[in-house]
């Protein structure tokens, strides 16, 4: 637990918030009570966050930032092609989510209104789309002819939709070590790149078989 003698950081507050919500099964009622419980001045909270709710959005941004930091620890990462970079991102990001699955599941299943749940991912969405733009190579821009700015936005948006489908699959995945999510990631990323290259048939059939199999098993 933090004390007044220690300098509070954004990471401290996030950690205390996640612990609180998991232990209590609900959000703190107020900043005042949250700060008092964790023995630090309320004013220090506002150095980093404006509201309790803003912590939730920051958590998913921090997952993203941690993922990118881990990727860049691999000295070979800058030499990866776009597909390899995206696969590395997915596997690393979902490994972090899995290490915090109890919180993530509780957070993203809090509201029946999916729009409210998606609002928690707004900061992550912006960073993810920017990341896609950064790893997008000229190979894919050239093949899509003109209107590169419009085409790049389309790729970013479609990548985000793919990410949300992957997140939903992971949330529902009950396989050991979430191994089915790993398979989903490999097949969906492969398909997305072959769609860009206009050669999707084999991967589309393969991916379709996998999804059909999963849906059939879940109904049994």
Image (cartoon, rainbow, N blue to C red):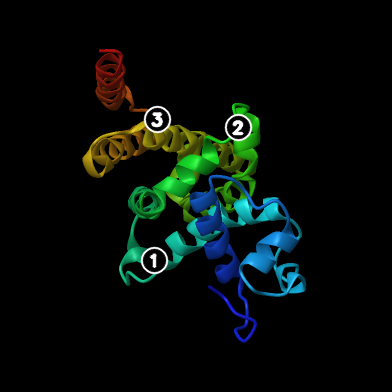
What residue did someone put label 3 on?
Answer: 195
Residue 154 appears in the figure = yes
What residue did someone put label 1 on?
Answer: 70
The image shows residue 134, relative to residue 159, as above or below, that is: below
Image quadrant in which the C terminus is located: top left
Element type at marker 2? Answer: loop
Give the mark toward the camera: 1 or 2.
Answer: 2
Judge by depth and name the residue closer to the eye, 80 or 110. Answer: 110
Q: Position of residue 48 (x, y in %)?
A: 70, 68
Q: Which mark is residue 7?
A: none
Task: Say left or right for 119 vs 14.
Answer: right
Q: CA distance from mark 1 to mark 3?
A: 29 Å
Task: Say left or right for 126 vs 142.
Answer: right
The image shows residue 208, relative to residue 69, as above or below, that is: above
C-beta proximity under 8 Å, tags 1 and 3: no
Few, some or many C-alpha atoms within 10 Å of disc 3 (few <14, some 14-19, many ≥20)?
some
Quarter assignment of residue 4:
bottom right
Q: Which mark is residue 111?
A: 2
Few, some or many C-alpha atoms within 10 Å of disc 2 (few <14, some 14-19, many ≥20)?
few
Q: CA distance from mark 1 to mark 2?
A: 31 Å
Element type at marker 3? Answer: helix
Task: Say left or right for 50 vs 93.
Answer: right
Residue lying at 27% horizontally and 20% vertically, measured from the top left: 205
Q: Position of residue 152 (x, y in %)?
A: 57, 43
Residue lying at 45% horizontally and 52% vertically, measured from the top left: 137
Element type at marker 1? Answer: helix
Q: Position of residue 98 (x, y in %)?
A: 36, 49
Task: Say left or right for 95 vs 124.
Answer: left
C-beta proximity under 8 Å, tags 2 and 3: no
Residue 197 appears in the figure = no
Give the mark toward the camera: 2 or 3.
Answer: 2
């Amino acid at each position: 637990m933090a004390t007044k003698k220690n300098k509070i950081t954004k990471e401290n507050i996030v950690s205390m918030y996640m612990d609180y919500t998991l232990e209590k099964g609900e959000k703190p009622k107020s900043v005042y009570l949250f700060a008092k419980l964790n023995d630090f001045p309320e004013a220090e909270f506002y150095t980093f966050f404006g509201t309790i709710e803003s912590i939730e959005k920051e958590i998913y941004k921090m997952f993203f930032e941690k993922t990118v930091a881990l990727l860049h620890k691999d000295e070979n990462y800058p030499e990866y092609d776009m597909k390899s970079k995206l696969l590395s991102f997915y596997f690393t990001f979902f490994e972090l989510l899995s290490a915090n699955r109890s919180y993530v599941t509780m957070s993203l299943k809090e509201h029946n209104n999916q729009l409210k749940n998606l609002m928690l991912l707004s900061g992550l969405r912006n960073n993810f789309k920017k990341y896609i733009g950064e790893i997008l190579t000229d190979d894919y821009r050239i093949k899509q002819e003109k209107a590169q700015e419009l085409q790049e936005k389309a790729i970013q948006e479609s990548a985000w939709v793919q990410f949300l489908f992957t997140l939903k699959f992971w949330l529902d995945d009950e396989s050991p070590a979430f191994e089915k999510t790993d398979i989903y990631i490999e097949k969906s990323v492969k398909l997305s790149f072959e769609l860009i290259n206009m050669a999707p048939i084999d991967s589309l059939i393969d991916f379709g078989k996998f999804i059909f199999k999963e849906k059939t098993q879940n109904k049994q």
